[in-house]
Image (cartoon, rainbow, N blue to C red):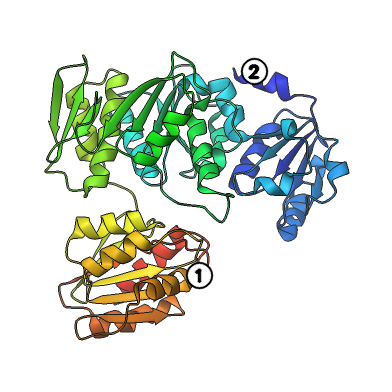
Amino acid sequence: MLNRLKKDFKGKKILLAGFGQEGKSSYRFLRSFCEPGRIGICDENKNALEQFILENPSDKMQTYTSFDPIKDLQKYNWIIKSPGIPIAKLSGLPSDKIISQTDIFLKYFGQQVIGITGTKGKSTTASLIYHILKMSGKDPYLVGNIGNPVFDILEDIDPKSLIVFEMSSHQLALVRHSPSLAVLLNLFEEHLDYYSSFTEYGLAKFNIAAFQNEGNQFIFNATDPVICKFISELTLNGHKLPFGKNKIDSPKAFIDDQKVCFSEDGSEFTVLDFSKRKNLPGNHNLLNILVAVLVGRIFSLSIEQINEGVFSFNGLSHRLEYLGKFRDFHFYNDSIATIPEATIEAIKTLKIVNTLILGGKDRGINYRSLVEYLKSNPIPNLVMMGTAGKRIQQEGQFINTENQNVFFISAFNELKEIIIAHSQPGGIVLLSPAASSYDMFSNFEKRGEAFKKMAEDL
């Protein structure tokens, strides 16, 4: 397949739209067999492009810092769009020329791909599946939105390799191919600053299964009403394997009192008890485990292999991550929580939160569920930040009372004094913002690291 891919691209003129981590990955791969001068790069970071030209003078690439010179860009056979480039920026170019690294990979290697998407939980689920497969002696690779571009493994994989591919909506938006095994965990409001509507966002997610054939499999959350509505309106050819939070009609798998129950012959259910797990707390992670169990059984792993993989998995940073006890306060880093539903789940899991840090960039998502939950389950100290924090505060009309302190911070380093002065000794301090980090930080990881450093400085 790799030779066929190279043959199809050789001799073509290719423009890379975006030159971040994935764009650089595409360039490295294409440059390994394409002639100099056949690859163009368009990115708004002029300094980065100039530096790249200085470092690679013999490559003779054409660079652009804007998509405005449409006529010049039309000379390219294909335009490989990076996930971070909004489709609207390419609106003047022929749509049949615009492709993506994700779609290229699925076209040639889709039969080896286990694709995982969802608004929340996809990194944890993908990493857990990879860990279980690796522990059982398979040959898996973990790629995609988790930070490993798929083109970086093209020279390493063989027909027996399994590709665990975490897929964001941005990566799925333009695909015309789907993985042979697709997983859709959930759908909540997210990225409404990128898509024209929630429907457009949902359809991008559903591309993970939209192009499957009858021999493919689609694992989906049948207790998510949004997912069920989309399924009722779409034609999907893959074999459907439903899972859910509880026993549903004709289930393939469901949760019952911290136990995973799944059927393998249509009537008999097997039960696995994960109530004593420590590294993946909360019911949301139990659903992630359930999906990993289903995938493991599809690849004929034994119950013992799956159990060993789940209990030896350490979880991921910034996802309800216990940082430790500092100055007599317990710190939890849940910086990945960029939607209200994730924050509510974090509070439910920890049960007694003393100080909650909320807010960030406002992307127009609905905070009503979070506001109502915080009113019914008051937290002694609420710290708001950013435009999202202001809106949560305004919608909830949260004010200082005898039983609750409400703060608004304009800089992250203001947290320390508030925590010292107002948090209860032995209590939990939780960063679970329910908002994007892009007002103060370049990504949620940077926000989580800043929180961790602040805790350690105490």
Q: Which residue is mark 1?
A: 440
> What label does residue 183 carry, if any?
none
Asked if residue 429 shows in the view, the reply is no
Asked if residue 245 shows in the view, the reply is yes
Label 1's element? loop
- Place of residue 128 in the rendered image (x, y in percent of width and height, measured from the top left): 31, 37
- In this view, which residue lies farthest toward the right? 71
Q: Quadrant of residue 378?
A: bottom left
Residue at left offset 41%, top offset 68%: 359
Residue at left offset 84%, top offset 45%: 70
Disc 1 vs disc 2: which is toward the camera? 1
Q: Which residue is mark 2?
A: 3
Q: CA distance from mark 1 to mark 2?
A: 45 Å
16 to the left or right of 371: right
- Place of residue 280 in the rendered image (x, y in percent of width and height, measured from the top left): 23, 46
- Place of residue 153 in the rendered image (x, y in percent of width and height, measured from the top left): 53, 31
Q: Quadrant of residue 355?
A: bottom left
Q: How many numbered dots are placed on residues in this image?
A: 2
Q: Quadrant of residue 59?
A: top right
Badge 1 density bin: few <14, some 14–19, many ≥20, Cα 10 Å: some
282 to the left or right of 335: left
Label 2's element? helix
Q: What amino acid is at disc 2?
A: Asn
Q: Nearer the viewer, residue 238 or 418?
A: 238
Disc 1 to disc 2: CB gap under 8 Å: no
